[in-house]
Amino acid sequence: MSKTIIRAMVLPMTGPDAFFPEGEICIEDQRIVSVGETGSAPAGFIPDRILELPNDVVMPGLINTHTHAAMTLLRSYADDLPLMPWLQEKVWPFEDKLTDEDIYWGTSLALCEMIRSGTTTMLDMYASMDQVAEAVLLAGTRAVLSRGLIGNGPNGNRALQENIDLVHRYHGAGNGRVSIMFGPHAPYTCSAEYLQKVKTEADRLKVGIHIHVAETQDEINIIKEQQGKTPVQWLDELGLFGGHVVAAHCVHITPQDMEIFARQHVCVAHNPESNMKLSSGTAPITELRSKGVVVSLGTDGASSNNNLDLFGEMRSASYQQKLRVNTTALPAYDVLEMATIGGAQTLGLEDVGMLAPGFKADLITIDMDQPHFYPRFSIPAHLVYAAHAGDVRTVMVDGKLLMEERKLLTMDVGKVCHEAEIRAKRIFKELNG
Ligand SMILES: CSC[C@H]1O[C@@H](n2cnc3c(O)ncnc32)[C@H](O)[C@@H]1O
Ligand SMILES: [Zn+2]
């Protein structure tokens, strides 16, 4: 049994007006017991640890709903290219050389970066997912993991079996910190028959599906030529939707596609920085949200971003919609919702994303006693428009501290950076002599 009290400014993300300037959160083991003003702890709650952080804001941990964690090994390896040449000429040849251990260390590097920037949960899609799961279990974060499935390639069936095995081995592991989805890569890398097989397995094992959808105009052209309809309409007619589906990107979608998402409760993972860097386009986020579609935020991998910082992603998401629509689009609180409770809804996690009694204690604190946070007119505006990754002081997941005073408690950052550097450079040498 462990009992903790955190005293700080509390932004619980339970509604736009909920804020406790002199707040207090009580935590027992993995869960939050109470949230309120200082002095609101239940009678008889005797903590064995008190974190006095009066100049910090405590808020839910951020949730990254689309990434390829181990792609940290490709950071700054392949820049300034559009999606297809980037994948075909640079990324896939590099990924062909990755070993299971490389993916373990690349994922660990991503987890160091995520914890240090306030991300407590990720939805990942990659290969060697047992190693990814082990890295997550050791780091102490929460993750939903999917085996990336390129159905049209020679390994499509083997990869599908790996995804099935992953469900059996890791769904619910780490006291529920790890769960599994299926990861068909995209409409242009999976046939109709393959996607239907994936859907059958996902339904049988009662887990969700994570897929890239409508990322580029090239994808729309390919699928329209092959199928005579948009990727979203094709996937809908194939029967892929209807269960729990997370669609990443969704840049080039029509009003009819948005109606399908709303009707089928497809959740969208928006990746504004990757979409800008690959020059893919600007997703119609305000329209999706006004149709009732759940939209959350992802960074995509570190090769198309090139960081895993959701504070930057929140700012980019807001600014991008303001540029596309007008200045009232995606105000600060709405973006914070996308990065917290919206992320939890996207991942089907019912007890994270807010600070409320009964919820899991996945939370972060941000040091507000810094010049760029004065004067304090609006905490949500500060967090979205002024904060950066380095402002995160404390990270807790499942009631366990993963970072205190910016020191990682579960990971050896020096060792992780060293392993990542030598492994990435080895592959570079293998490819370039
Ligand atoms: C088979 S594992 C996942 C696969 O996806 C690749 N990937 C990374 N970013 C993107 C993106 O924006 N669109 C499509 N595919 C992407 C990654 O390199 C892996 O090969
Ligand atoms: Zn992706």
Image (cartoon, rainbow, N blue to C red):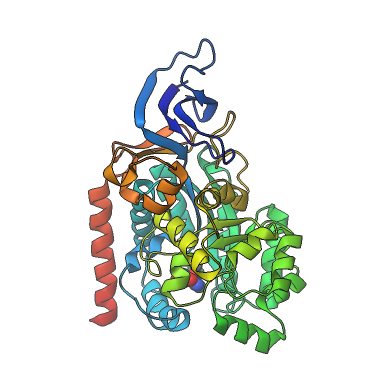
| Side (left or right) of 115 relative to 59 | left
Q: Quadrant of residue 358?
A: top right
- Does residue 210 appear in this view? no
- 417 in relation to 344, above or below: below
Q: Residue at x 70, y 72 (%)?
A: 255
Q: Residue at x 38, y 46 (%)?
A: 115
**Residue 258 x/y as whole percent:** 69, 67
Q: Quadrant of residue 349?
A: top right
Q: Is 52 or 65 nearer to us in this picture?
A: 52
**Residue 432 x/y as whole percent:** 26, 81
| Side (left or right) of 104 relative to 153 | left
Residue at the extreme bottom: 225
- 178 in relation to 216, above or below: above
- Does residue 352 appear in this view? yes
**Residue 208 x/y as whole percent:** 65, 56
Q: Residue at x 68, y 56 (%)?
A: 244
Q: Is 3 or 416 nearer to us in this picture?
A: 3
- 167 in relation to 429, above or below: above
**Residue 318 x/y as whole percent:** 49, 59
Q: Is 372 or 40 nearer to us in this picture?
A: 372
